[in-house]
Amino acid sequence: MKNKNLVSITDFSKEEYLRILELAAEFEMKPRQDILRGYVISTLFFEPSTRTRLSFETAINGLGGRVIGFTDSGATSTAKGETLYDTIKMVSNYADLIVMRHPLEGSAKLASEISSVPIVNAGDGANQHPTQTLLDMYSIQKTQGTLDGLKIFMVGDLKYGRTVHSLLMAMSRFNTTFYFISPEELMLPAVYKLHLDKMGLEYHEGKDLAEFLPEADIIYMTRVQQERFTDPIEYERVKNAYVLRRNMLEGTRETMKVLHPLPRVNEIHTDVDDSPHAYYFQQARNGVFVRMAILSAILGVK
Ligand code: CP
């Protein structure tokens, strides 16, 4: 993985996913190591973030590296009209690796074609969020003991949800059965269903969350993302389409876990938080170890 870009989750092979998960488990056991001393990593966030940026920065600090970057592109020369091309050209002079979040789909790919140092995509519009996927996979493996042959429910905004798109692509390599639950307006784009058809995988599509719930190994809830809608009336119509409540989890598998990339708005009621099925806050914690693994693999120190 040394010097590779991580723009799409398909940039890594199945073996590389498993290596990242193995490294993440090592970092969870020993989260303070000085292996990134002397490295500078840039975090460029053109779009808001809490978990992704802070867990990357926690990972870098824990491994002894240094961080440069910004969280508000309005306070950079982007506000004076500097292009993404020029920004990436410049920052790749200063850092050994760039972590970038940007609202435009394809922006991470563009950055990887410009940069002289590896690019890690921290989310590009509605397209992909590969580092989230690796931490989701780590959470699935940790709670289910395997990645193979699971039944995964994806619920909510399957149209614009970049975490859903990346996770689907990765888990399609592990004989997963998928259940896609969304309102009509936010159904999974056809390109992903074509991919599953090509892989010969079983999937179900519907609007009723309760119908198959007892079969689930993982319920992956997602937020309806206001920022992706051009029509506010459409957002209002679908924003509360699904609200998971604790009583809905009665009769589900004992080992079933509820995941969510977070932030949540209303889609998981707080009465789920102390249920043994809730795993979304631990999932976010796992992000630190998985991002340590990604950085150290790409920088070639592990
Ligand atoms: N899961 C995730 O990407 O969260 P943030 O937007 O807070 O980074």
Image: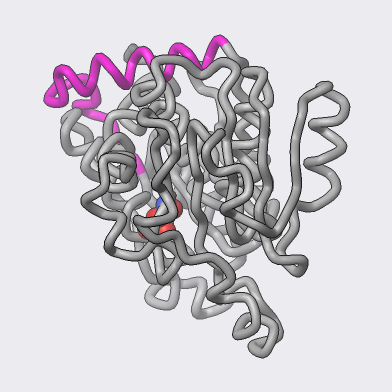
Rendering quarter of residue 300: top left
Q: Nearer the viewer, residue 172 or 31?
A: 172
Q: Is residue 32 left or right of residue 200?
A: left
Image vertical order of residue 73 relative to residue 58, above or below: below
| Image color mode | one colour
The number of callouts visible is 0
* Residue 287 visible, this angle: yes
Q: Is residue 94 left or right of residue 158?
A: left
Q: Is residue 173 magenta?
A: no
User: Residue 91's x, y, as percent?
Assistant: 45, 49
Q: Nearer the viewer, residue 9 or 38?
A: 9
Image vertical order of residue 210 relative to residue 153, above or below: below
- Residue in view at x 29 percent, y 34 percent: 286
Q: Nearer the viewer, residue 286 or 259?
A: 259
Q: Nearer the viewer, residue 248 or 154?
A: 248
- Residue in view at x 61 percent, y 43 percent: 212
- Residue in view at x 65 percent, y 57 percent: 208
Question: Seen from this angle, which residue lies furthest front?
Answer: 251
- The magenta stretch is 15-41
User: Residue 292's x, y, as percent?
Assistant: 30, 29
- Residue in view at x 47 percent, y 37 percent: 131
* Residue 85 visible, this angle: no
User: Residue 126's x, y, as percent?
Assistant: 64, 57
Q: Quadrant of ligand 1?
A: bottom left
Image vertical order of residue 7 relative to residue 208, above or below: above
Rendering quarter of residue 175: top right
User: Residue 209's x, y, as percent?
Assistant: 59, 54
Which quarter of the figure is the C terminus placed in? top left
Q: Is residue 35 magenta?
A: yes
